[in-house]
Amino acid sequence: MQISRHISGLPRGSATLGFIGLVSACGVAPEQCAVSDNHFGKGVPKDLGNELVLNTSSGSYGNNRTFLSFSNYSVIDCRTGEEKTFVLEDIFESNRGTDGGQTDTSPVAIRPRVESGDAGDQLLAYLNAGNFESLSEIAAKAEELGIVVREQTNENEDCGCAAFYPRLLGDKEPAPERNA
């Protein structure tokens, strides 16, 4: 304690509080961001560089009449909270029959089902290659591949941003994993 107080030039206790704050601000491991249950999965985020983070997610839910499913990638700009979601398979509903069985699997669309097929693999290869500077370049590539792109701006910090770019919290609400 004595050494850190003299180095920092701060009053007694200030250096300790600053150090504790630094540890808690940087204490999110990417693996803490992964979520999995019977109906939803979110993978471990990946740092794409340029303060961008990739998330993958998929999920499904069924009851005795319907089945809902989705799969997508999303990239978040940790500076601004801007997020682009690249829809690989959109939510849809199928009629499963009155007995809950798969007697009639014809789609009854909630939203049109989108399947990107090889385009999703091509987008992932593009992301892994890192030959882009911005989120808008990634969105342009996805659209070129025929992938549906959705946009939003988050007021809450993404867990992957907390893990890779904790200094970029800004005015966003901290990710819950910061306190886990």
Image (cartoon, helix red, strand yellow):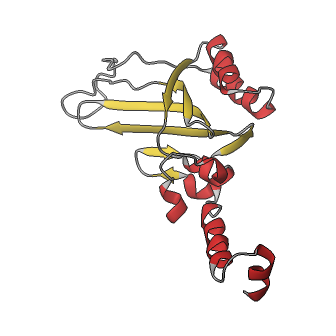
Left or right, 83 with respect to 103, comes to: right
Could one spot residue 99 in this view of the protein?
A: yes
* 156 relative to 146 in the view: left or right: left
Farthest left residue in view? 98
Residue nearest the viewer, comparing 109 with 7: 7
Q: Which quadrant does the N terminus fall into? A: bottom right
| Snapshot quadrant of residue 63 | top left
Residue drawn where x is 65% and y is 68% of the image: 23
Q: Is residue 44 visible?
A: no
Task: Find residue 127 and report its horizontal and vertical position in percent.
Answer: 73, 30
At horizontal 75% and vertical 36% (from top left) the residue drawn is 50
> Up-down: is 46 above or below 85?
below
Image position, residue 8 (x, y; %): 76, 74
Query: Compared to 53, does 14 lie above or below?
Result: below
Of residues 72 and 157, the one nearer the viewer is 157
* Residue depicted at 58% across the width and 39% down the height: 56
Residue drawn at the location 48% of the way across and 57% of the way down: 176
Left or right: where 25 falls relative to 150: right
**Number of numbered labels in the structure image:** 0
- Residue 60, above or below 43: above
Counting from the top left corner in percent of width and height, residue 27 is at: 63, 64
- Of residues 100 and 123, the one nearer the viewer is 123
- Residue 59 shown left or right of residue 26 in the figure: left
Tell me where residue 51 sits by quadrant.
Answer: top right
